[in-house]
Image: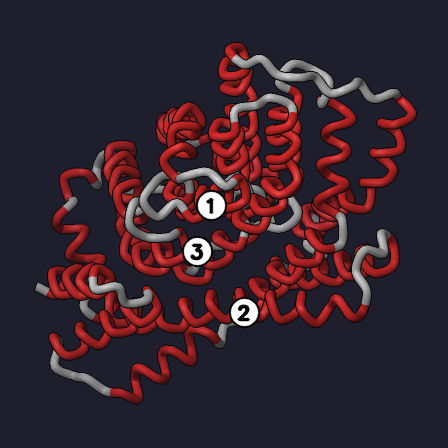
Amino acid sequence: MALAVFLSSLFGLMLLGMPIAFALMLTGVALMVHLDFFDAQLVAQNMLSGADNYPLMAVPFFILAGELMNAGGISQRIINLAVSLVGHIRGGLGYVTIGASVMLASLSGSAIADTAALATLLIPMMRDNGYPVPRSAGLIASGGIIAPIIPPSMPFIIFGVTTNTSISGLFMAGIVPGLLMGAGLVITWMFVVRGMTVKLQPKASWGERRHALFDGVWALALPVIIIGGLRGGIFTPTEAAVVAAVYSLVVALFVYRQVTLKDLVPLLVQAARTTSTVMFLCAAALVSSYMVTLADLPQQMNEMLSPLLEHPKLLMVAITLLLLAVGTVMDLTPTILVLGPVLTPLAAAAGIDPTYFGVMFVLTGTLGLIHPPVCTVLNVVCGVARISLESATRGIWPFLLTYLLLLCLLIAVPEIVTAPLSLFHR
């Protein structure tokens, strides 16, 4: 009965158009009333505890780092480097998009920030060179969702905090799947571009490539610093976020000099607005998460899915299908906050590695960012490219199919995700 109250309250409030944060909070209240111990003070205490969490301090700093990277010219130099290396080959701007997506993913950890930067810079170039805009939009959106998988990743931080999973482990385990996403897009683009008649970019000289490399070396150094620091135990993921923000600030102000002290105020305001949205979601989610635990919903889910507990791969298939369905109506962060605490104990009962499960959870959830109707990332590209969502949806299906095939591979061979963890723990 408690499970029915939880689901009907959450989805009923969402269908009424209530913001997800308030829906999460009121779902927790509904469970309190159902269990007959409503206490307003308990709601307030849980909301305060939801935001008062040390690992969550990484979120505002990574958000600020992303704002500084885009405004400070770091993103532009990453794209310039990719254009100088592969822009001249057939379909070169598509490969530039993929390469820049992977490199930017290792800097900001935000799908929306990376996608907005890529779309703003590359959509006009691809349109002018004869690339079909819907297909270009689909590729850019598909590349943008690599950001939540390759560290640093804000969704991994939120998942780790919500489910008490090692954030450093999630970061390390996300590297190979993120690179596989990029490789999958490269292979798919090779087939897609065959039917296009596009202009080729002029081939850059070795001098121009060398200049682009030296100009972008400050941007390329950041992922090395972050991954090296985490791998070497120099700093925690939260401290890595501070390092990323300070490094981006110094580069933007004193190296590339595209940000002035006057520009910092609107950048800080925008970062604060984005942070407040995420943190309020986390605060409200702890109310429902607390009640989910108290109502013993994970155990009820265990009993419902007990036939699958002895078959971990079948359970992963079932959870993947569930997350794909949820992704059609819910954004990634709410999906983590709502289903993470419910499904993680279920996966643990089946003997599934929690870090592997976290990577698969976030990877599956990111697909909801590019398929309708929610498709936050795809909507960003549509706004920049000035095309309809229907057109962009037609352009994205080959890349979405590639990601679904990658999910099947990772379910069949989980060692692809878990193998790097042994290197991290050495």
- Residue 70 x, y percent position in the rendering: 68, 52
Q: Give the residue displayed 26% in from the left and 63% down from the top.
A: 17
Residue corresponding to mark 1:
377
Q: Amino acid at mark 2?
A: Arg
Q: Earlier in the sequence, mark 3 or mark 2?
A: 3
Q: Secondary structure at mark 1?
A: helix
- Residue 47 x, y percent position in the rendering: 38, 78
Q: Is residue 141 left or right of residue 204?
A: left
399 to 242, vertically: above or below: above
Q: Give the residue displayed 27% in from the left and 56% down from the top.
A: 342
Residue corresponding to mark 2:
273
Q: Earlier in the sequence, mark 2 or mark 1?
A: 2
Q: Is residue 413 visible?
A: no
- How far apart are labels 1 and 3 at the CA level? 20 Å
Label 2: few (<14), some (14–19) or many (≥20) C-alpha neighbours in 10 Å: few
Q: Secondary structure at mark 2?
A: helix
Cβ–Cβ under 8 Å for marks 2 and 1: no
Q: Secondary structure at mark 3?
A: helix
- How far apart are labels 2 and 1 at the CA level? 18 Å
418 to 93, vertically: above or below: below
Task: Identify the image quadrant of the C terminus.
Answer: top right
- Residue 124 x, y percent position in the rendering: 63, 35
Q: Is residue 235 left or right of residue 7?
A: right
Label 3: few (<14), some (14–19) or many (≥20) C-alpha neighbours in 10 Å: many
The quadrant holding residue 127 is: top right
Label 1: few (<14), some (14–19) or many (≥20) C-alpha neighbours in 10 Å: many
Q: Amino acid at mark 1?
A: Val
Residue corresponding to mark 3:
159
- How far apart are labels 3 and 2 at the CA level? 21 Å
